[in-house]
Image: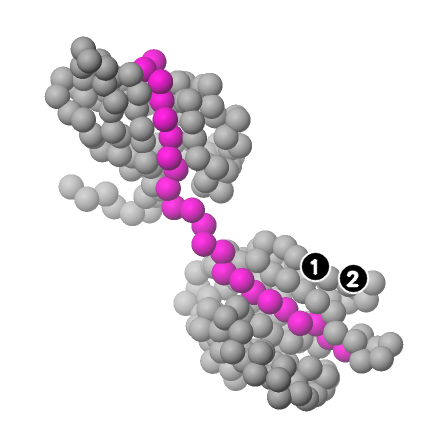
């Protein structure tokens, strides 16, 4: 078992450990949790007694993401998921630093930083419905790099059954509206369709013709849209 005084013998470090804003934990060479701080417990919704002596793999997806037994590894950083006590998963950045006592591998100091994923995609279309801009958040939310989208028609990313409705909807907007809301399916790069609520604002020329469309879309898959 990892002796707690390997890290926590000095009051200064103990103060740093317990009051650090990110989740911190110490595990032994086999990956069993020996110490956790308050931020980690708050992040995952567990009480301290539920975590001590438990394998870290119990809380991290995918299991085995951190190779504790590899004594050659000096440090590791990766993005993965952590299980909350209520059953859902949190996107985190995990940093792993080995601890040594002399020449002996004494354990690991683990930092879990909660990642705030972008919630919206901002895009701009030309008058003929071709992307001229899309925000980098499209990579996290739909899997595409911006350069895979810019220059392509918006219809290429919508569900085939909804393209006609989109065209009709856009035609109505020419009449009097400056801003509209549309709900439809958007294709993720992995092939699945996500339900998006998109608000579009129209830029018009002096004749009233739409020359540019600025959109903000959010993923509402699994959320029942309001009437």
Q: Quadrant of residue 133?
A: top left
- Relative to 10, 43 lies left or right: left
- Horizontal and vertical percent for residue 6? 72, 84
Q: Of residues 192 and 80, which is closer to you in this image?
A: 80
Neighbor class of circle 1 (other Cα within 10 Å; few <14, some 14-19, many 20+) is few
The residue tagged with tag 2: helix, strand or loop? loop
Is residue 194 highlighted in magenta? no
**Residue numbers of the magenta segment:** 106-128
Residue holding disc 1 = 76
In terms of secondary structure, what is the magenta stretch mainly?
A: strand
Residue holding disc 2 = 73
- Horizontal and vertical percent for residue 221? 34, 43
- Horizontal and vertical percent for residue 219? 35, 42
Is residue 124 highlighted in magenta? yes
220 lies above or below 113: above
Tag count: 2
Residue 54 visible in image: no
Residue at 44%, 35% in the rendered image: 135
């Amino acid at each position: 078992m990892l002796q707690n005084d390997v890290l926590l013998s000095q009051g200064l470090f103990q103060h740093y450990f317990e009051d650090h804003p990110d989740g911190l934990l110490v595990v032994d060479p086999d990956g069993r949790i020996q110490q956790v701080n308050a931020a980690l417990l708050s992040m995952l919704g567990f009480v301290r007694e539920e975590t001590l002596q438990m394998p870290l793999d119990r809380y991290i997806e995918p299991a085995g993401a951190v190779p504790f037994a590899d004594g050659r590894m000096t440090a590791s950083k990766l993005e993965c998921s952590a299980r909350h006590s209520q059953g859902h998963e949190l996107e985190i950045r995990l940093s792993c630093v080995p601890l040594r006592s002399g020449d002996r591998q004494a354990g690991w100091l683990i930092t879990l930083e909660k990642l705030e994923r972008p919630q919206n995609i901002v895009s701009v279309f030309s008058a003929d419905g071709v992307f001229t801009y899309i925000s980098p958040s499209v990579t996290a939310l739909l899997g595409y790099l911006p350069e895979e989208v810019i220059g392509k028609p918006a219809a290429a990313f919508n569900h085939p059954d909804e393209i006609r409705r989109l065209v009709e909807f856009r035609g109505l907007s020419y009449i009097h509206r400056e801003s509209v809301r549309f709900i439809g399916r958007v294709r993720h790069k992995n092939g699945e369709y996500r339900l998006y609520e998109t608000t579009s604002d129209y830029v018009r020329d002096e004749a009233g013709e739409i020359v540019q469309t600025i959109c903000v879309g959010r993923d509402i898959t699994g959320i029942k849209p309001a009437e």
